[in-house]
Every structure is written in structure tokens, then in C-alpha cells.
Amino acid sequence: MNIITTGNILLIGALLLFVAVIAGKAAYRFGAPALLFFLGVGILFGFHFISFHSVEATQFIGMIALCIILFTGGMDTKFSEIRPVIAPGVVLATAGVAMTAAIVAGFVTLIAPWIGFRISFSGALLLAATMSSTDSASVFSILRSKKQGLRENLRPLLELESGSNDPMAYVLTILLVGVLSGGAAEAVSIPMSVLKFVVQMVLGGAMGYAIGRVGVWTINRINLSNNSLYPVLLLAFVFFIFSFTDLIGGNGYLAVYLAGLVLGNNKLVQKRSLTIFFDGFTWLVQIVMFLTLGLLVNLDELLDPQVLLLGGLVGAFMMFVARPLTVFVCMAPFRKFTAKARVYVSWVGLRGAVPIIFATYPLLAGTEDATLLFNVVFLVTILSLLLQGTTVSWAANLLGLGYEERERAFGVDVHDDIPSVFTEVEVNEAMLGSGNTLREISLPEHTLVTMVCRDGDYFVPQGNTELKVHDKLLVVSDRGEELENTYKDMGIDEVMKL
């Protein structure tokens, strides 16, 4: 490759990233998912400027991106938050995926002849299987970028479901691709398929937990002289977990998600810097992945009237029939969720990059109607991001389930070895009941208010400093339980632990 060509590739890549970031900013302003704009930028450049047709490269980029996205999602998830919703989350991630695929396959088989397509039930099932999981990249990025708080433990439930249901959809897709491309005889056998699925799940879970624990031990004891190498080491662990688990027949996607959970819920050296690195890197791979998927699509094929009609009908059926029916059936045993909560979970069944990446497997295998399948999946994803992705917050507020998460006023990085408790609270009327000065506030011994934030200004307080309602305080204490009880006595419900 000559220098000019290399320079052109770098220039085009830089322009794509720059336009994607600007598009992401515009998306945030208009309340739309940034990922949808990334996809749009890819389609625009692919239609006018760039010729890109490599399914293999797209699949490889998607695999890398999914590893990082799932791992980061696991790291950012507190096990204490998902513990109460593990049962419904696992049911939605397994039985829910299979049920969605079966319902959608029946619908596609029914309506395809009316539109002019001949699709077998196996082909319809493959189409449905690729779209059967919710997309972790979409769910994680939309909920967290919008600072959307959800009642009834819905946010950890949705993140657990989206982070753990890709393996089920992946197994279904690979098995059906084997059937339709004339693979091994055991691929058609239902008992062997079930056994293969169980083996993949068990090995994926075991490897994710085991290598995750090894990662915790290694990072905390390796004592690198250059702190910048810790993210590199953890990145190596992520790719090793996926590839090794896949090599021995386990599900690599499940393994990296569980490893992220293990690492994120244990004390780690340089944890703050690791979190910052992976957060930024996750956005980079998401942008690259969605741009690549946008470049791959053929706009002429996508805008074919018959394809548009089939994609529109399938997308509408998934959003308004298949997903709600699946959610209400799967969540029926779990009585603690209200009807409004079930409706919201039904609506936030976002599709994104994962279904499109799974749709590249039939393209590579050369299965019948693979191009049609890819285009329909692409259209369904766009519809889901347009309708569901833009109404995540609106639907939560409409159902009375949403609230805006309070942003931290103090970006304090607290080392795990420090035993003191760092909290951020907002001054209320009850706190000032005994007086307005800091010395008149009753706090436990060995507790200090180290900083005050007032209307965006920060200052270190003294005993005679007058406090005002809505001031934010950074409080450090060696008496965590006593301080917690003091907050309760003052009527302070929102306590942010740093």
C-alpha cells in the first residue's frame, strides 16, 4: 500500500469520526439516539463517497466492538443493583429471546407470500433469531447518556437483559445458519442443539467468572511502574476471555459480560482510570461499528418497495405485538412489577448493531434470501431506534416511572484502600433547623464537610460559613453508619456515595 493511499484512508477515517461526533452532539440536542446518527453518517458516506462491501471486515469489527461494549457494560453494573432482578432478567434473556423468535417467525411466514416473497419457516426463523435480542449498545448508551433514572429497578433489569441476551440470539442464529446452509447433520437435531446451547452457556459463564477473578488478582498484584499500562493489560484480558472461551466451545459474549461484572464489582488498582479508558474506548468502537454497518448497506436494495413493506410490517409487529406478548408472559411469575413497569419493559426492546451483525452470518454462509434478511434487519433496527430510542425518557415519564438522575457536583476519585466514606448531599430545610452555619449542623464525630458547591462555585467552608438550601456538600466521615442515620433524621433521601 503506498503512502498516498494510506493518507487517504486516514483522512477519510478522521472525517468520518469527526462527522459522527458532531452528529452525536446534534442527536443529544434533539433527543434522538446518537447511535442512529452514527448509522446515518455511515449510510450517507457509503451512498456518495465510499465503496465498502466487506462482510468479513464488518463482522470482525462488530465482534471486537461487542466484546468491549459488553465488558464495559458489565463493569459499570453494580451487582447489588441487579441481584433483585436476576430471575426476570435471565428469563427475558433466554426464554424471552426464543419466544420472540418463534412469534416473529410465524408472522413472517404468514405475511411474506402476500408481499411477493417465498420464505420458508426455517428462513423466517433465522430472520427472527437475528433480531430476537435487545441491543446492549443501544440500551446502555441511551439510558446512561440521558441520565434516565427508572423506578422499580427497571434500569438494572433492562441493562441485565440487553447485556446477557445476545448469547441466546447468537446460538440460535449460528444453529439456523448451519441448517439452511446444509451444515452437519447434528445441527438439525433438536437434542444436540439444546445440548450445544447448554454447553456454550455453562462454559461461557464459568470462563467469564474464572478468568475475571484471575484478572482481579493479576491487576491488583502486578504492580506496574507505568500506570498507563493497566488499561492495556485489561484490554488484553478482554480479548483473551472472548477468544479462549470461543476456542473451547463456550459463548464468548456471555464470558466477557460476566468478566466485566466480576472486575467491576471488586476493588481494583487504578479502577478510576480503567473506567475512564473503557468508557471512551467503548464510544469509539460503537462509532466505528455503526459507521461500518452504515457503509455496508446497499441503499438501492434497502429502499426497494417490497423490502420496505416487509421491514416496516415486521418492525411494527415486533414493537407492538411480539415484544409486549413476550414480556408479559415471561414476567408473569414476578408479581412485584406493576403493569406500567411491564409496559415500559415491552417498549424498551431496542434493536441496534447486534441484529445487523448477526445478519452478516447468513451473508457469509450464502444462505437463501440472505440479502433480503440483512436489509429487513437493517430496516427494523432503524425503525426501533427512531420510534423506541427517541421515546425512552418520554415513555418513562408518561408512565410515571422516570426521574432525572442528579449529576455529581464533585468529581472525586476515591482510592479503594481509603476506609473513610465520601458522600455528596444537598442541603435541605431540616438540615438547617438548628441554625444556618456549618458548626450548628449536627454531624457524627470524625466527620468533616470538606467542600461546598453553590450555584456552580466551589469553596472550602469554615465553622462560621452560612449554608443555604440546595447547597451541595462533600462530606468525609469515618463513621459511615452513624452518618447514614443522621441523613435519615434530616430527611435526606438522595445520598451519593463517591
Image (cartoon, helix red, strand yellow):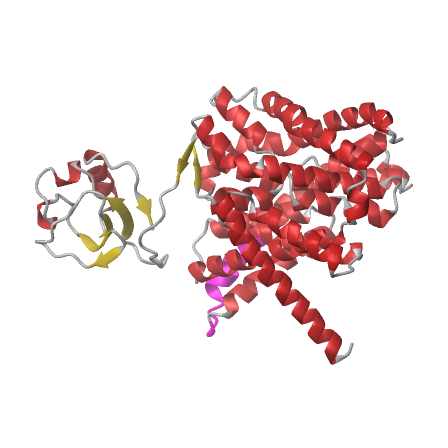
Does the magenta-highlighted stretch encompass residue 427? Answer: no
Which one is nearer the viewer's eye here, 63 or 194?
Answer: 63
Query: In the rendered view, would you say 387 is above or below 361?
Result: above
Q: Residue 59's spot in the image, x, y percent?
A: 74, 53
Q: Main secondary structure of the magenta part?
A: helix
Residue 454, percent from left and from top: 23, 51
How many marks can you see?
0
Q: Is residue 148 left or right of residue 356?
A: left
Vertical placement of residue 352 versus 67, above or below: above
> Image height check: is 88 above or below 223?
above
- The residue drawn where x is 39% and y is 41% is 405
Quadrant in which the N terminus appears: bottom right
448 lies left or right of 320: left
x, y percentage for residue 299? 77, 48
Residue visible at 50% across and 20% down in the picture = 339
Location of residue 468 (image quadrant): top left
Q: Is residue 222 magenta?
A: yes
Magenta stretch bounds = 210-226
Which residue is farthest bottom?
3
Query: Which residue corresponds to the image point at 55% horizontal and 29% vertical from the top-left?
Result: 345
**Residue 400 position (above or below residue 269):** above
- Closest to the observer, 67 or 421: 67
Q: Is residue 289 left or right of residue 215?
A: right
Q: Where on the picture, by quarter, is residue 469?
A: top left
- Residue in the image at 21% along x and 43% along y: 427
Q: Is residue 350 visible?
A: no
Q: Does residue 423 show up? A: yes
Tell me where residue 199 appears, x and y as whole percent.
72, 40
